[in-house]
Structures are given as C-alpha cells and as structure tokens.
Amino acid sequence: MPIITTKKAGTCRACGGLVRKGEEADFSAEMGLSHVEPQCSSGPVRFRPNARAARCACDTWVKAGEGRLRLVSDAGAQGGGKRWAVDCPACVVR
C-alpha cells in the first residue's frame, strides 16, 4: 500500500483512531486510511466511516455515521466502474 501525507484528518480503518492532517499514513481506495504502524496497516478493516445516509442491500435505511462502507467494483462492458455501498449494522456482522 502506498504511504501518503494526509491532506485532511481522517479515521484509521483498523483502530478507529485519528489520523491527523500532515501525518504519513497507508492508503488505498479499497481499504481506506490507516496508521503506518504494522498493527494498523496490516490489521483488518473494522472502522470505515460512513459520511452519508444511504440504503443497505437489505433495504434498511442507514443514517450517516452508522454502518460500514464497502467498495463495489463492476467490470461491465463499458469498462466498469467503482461505487460505494453501505452495509447496515445487522449486515456487517453476517
């Protein structure tokens, strides 16, 4: 994963801690932002903040700040694309 210098503060995907503006961090679109320490950069994704309200695949309305984001890739005939999907708390544990 590439190491970047953050341009704004964010939440670490592994520990949920604050990654400050100007701090070095690991980042990928699929995984998100994390601290560079091994326990965070190689740890599982547990915290991926959801900034917008949306509907889950099970048709449950998920408020902003709840649930978990998931990157969905589509390799369709037009070259495909990527979009964010939201999972409600009930679907996250499945």
Image: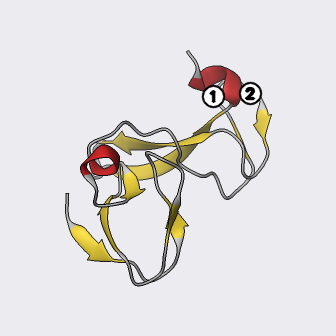
Which quadrant of the figure has residue 66?
A: top right
Element marked by disc 2: loop
Residue 73 to residue 56: above or below: below
In the image, is 7 to the left or to the right of 79?
right
Circles 1 and 2: CB atoms closer than 8 Å:
yes
Badge 2 crowding class, 10 Å Cα cut-off, few under 14, some 14 to 19, many 20 or more, is few
Is 1 placed above or below 10 here? Answer: above
3 horizontally vs 60: left or right = left
Q: Which residue is mark 2?
A: 59
| In front of the other: 65 or 81 | 65
Question: Looking at the image, how many numbered discs can be counted on the residues?
Answer: 2
Residue drawn at x 47%, y 81% as measured from the top left: 21
Residue 67 position within the rendered picture, expressed as x and y whole percent measured from the top left:
66, 38
| Quarter where residue 56 is shown | top right
Q: Position of residue 14 (x, y in %)?
A: 43, 45
Tell me residue 40's x, y (percent).
35, 48
- Residue drawn 68% across and 31% down? 88
**Residue 57, numbered label:** 1
Against 60, residue 84 (above or below) is below
> In this orientation, which residue lies closer to the viewer: 29 or 43?
43
Instruction: For mark 1, give the secondary structure.
Output: loop
| Quarter of the rendering occupied by the N terminus | bottom left
Residue at 58%, 26% in the rendered image? 92
Q: Amino acid at mark 1?
A: Ala
Residue situated in front as seen by the camera: 82 or 40? 40
Question: Relative to 63, is 9 above or below?
Answer: below
Checking the image for residue 91, the label placed there is none
- At 48% from the left and 47% from the top, the residue drawn is 15
How far apart, in angstroms, are the residues tagged by discs 1 and 2?
Answer: 5 Å
Dividing the image into 4 quarters, which one contains the C terminus? top right
Residue situated in front as seen by the camera: 56 or 67: 67
- Residue 30, given in percent of the width and then of the height, sits at 35, 49
